[in-house]
Image (cartoon, rainbow, N blue to C red):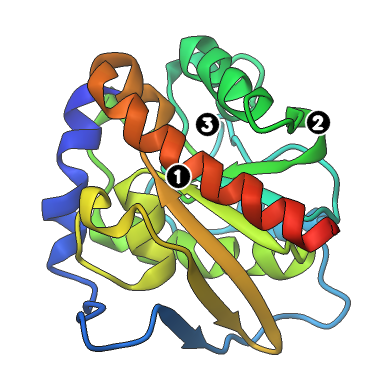
Amino acid sequence: MSKHREQQTDSQTGNLFGDLSAGESLTHTESIVFPQDDSLEKILADVKSSHTCGACKPGMPIVFGVGPEHTELMLIGEGPGIDDIKSEMPFQGQAGVLLTKMLAAINVSRSECYICNVIKCVPPGERNFSIEEIEDCRPLLLRQILAVNPRLIIAFGALAAQTLLRSKKTISDLRGSLYTLRLNDREITLAPTFNPAYLLRVAEKKREAWEDLKMVREFLNRASG
């Protein structure tokens, strides 16, 4: 993801979402309507045939997601970058290399995770994602979550964390805590942290990201214990 696009995320989405005030629990609850017998295959077909999203134009590469259809750990980024276009898979290039190292540090392999983004396409000219595009993609993302049915989601970057939690807090404010996402009849733990692409540019934030990953590791160890 480009530097300009990521820097704009907080201010862009801040006008749209509500906020998790300090007095509230670290829980976001909502319900969505989704097709019977929904699956990742059906969701991808809907993405390809959608005339709603302004980013996913006919003929553009779709970076939908990759990984096991049902898994305990789901990784959600903000949107695909130019490194993802050729393979049509998320988190390629140097950001993907760093992501792999981050996961290995907590004894997790990328192949164990389902990986996707909030936005499924690269907007023309690498412009910023609009609020309308984020909102158009959000129901598809929530359907992906229900289809994968993870125990834990790591939200990489402000756009991902804000979109899932309906919060306008910055990623610096959101990270450092585990949240509960109650989606229909599911209850999923969510850990916001910095986007690997951001960490490549701002190396001093890697220490905070490591603290977030240690929380994830402890949660996974408890869940498997």
65 horizontally vs 16: left or right: right
Question: Who comes first in sequence, dot 3 or dot 1?
Answer: 3
142 horizontally vs 125: left or right: right
Residue 1 percent location from the top left of the image? 36, 26
Residue 9 percent location from the top left of the image? 21, 46
- In this view, the residue in front, 57 or 47, is 47
Q: Secondary structure at mark 1?
A: helix
**Residue sitting at x 56%, y 32%:** 59
Residue 12 percent location from the top left of the image? 15, 54
Residue 53's mark? none
The residue labelled by disc 1 is 212
Q: Amino acid at mark 2?
A: Ser
Q: Secondary structure at mark 2?
A: helix
**Callout 1 environment at 10 Å: few (<14), some (14 to 19), or many (20+)?**
many
Q: CA distance from mark 2 to mark 1?
A: 21 Å
Residue 111's mark? 2
